[in-house]
Amino acid sequence: MGIMKKVAVLVVIFSIALTGKSLGLSMEGFLVWAIAIITVSELYSILQNCYAIMTGVILTEFDALSYTIKKLGEKVRSTLEQMIELPTTKK
């Protein structure tokens, strides 16, 4: 993962934590979980690259961070819609 993508992920994680903290929520567990996801994701990337160097076979890439951020975004949107009761657009 490129350095800009890593920085963007950290910005998202800390933005979520700061928002939660401002709402009076304990965000320590979330931060520990998010850092663990990043660490495991980087370990998988390192192992994947070593395997490719040793065997010449490129393994399928799985971007756990992007998936997690997408799901968090969906949850935040759902929560906001419930809080402010946005009207749904029907066609």
Image: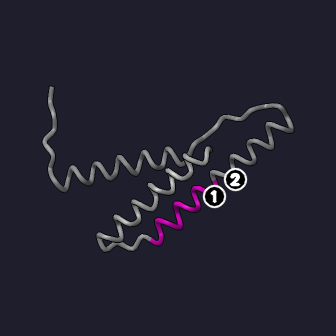
Magenta segment boundaries in residue numbering:
28-40
Q: Is residue 10 left or right of residue 81?
A: right
Q: What type of secondary structure mainly makes up the magenta span?
A: helix
Judge the density around disc 1: few (<14), some (14-19), many (≥20) Cα neighbours within 10 Å. few
On the image, the x and y values in percent for residue 68 come to: 48, 49
**Residue under the point 73% across and 42% down:** 48
Disc 2 and disc 1 in contact, CB within 8 angstroms? yes
Residue situated in front as seen by the camera: 90 or 24: 24
* Residue type at numbered disc 2: Leu
Local SS, label 1: helix
**Residue visible at 29% across and 48% down in the picture:** 77
Instruction: Name the amino acid, label 1.
Output: Thr
How many angstroms separate mark 2 from mark 1 (CA)? 6 Å
As drawn, the label of residue 39 is: 1
Q: Is residue 33 above or below residue 71?
A: below
| The quadrant where residue 63 appears | top right
Q: Which mark is residue 29?
A: none
> Which residue lies most toward the top here?
91
Q: Is residue 71 left or right of residue 58?
A: left
Write the residue at 46% across / 56% down. 11
Residue 38 sits inside the magenta stretch: yes
Secondary element type, mark 2: helix
Depicted 77 relative to depicted 14: above or below: above
Give coordinates of residue 44: x percent, y percent.
69, 48
* Residue at mark 2: 43
Q: Residue 3: say if magenta.
A: no
Question: Which of these two is toward me, 4 or 91?
Answer: 4
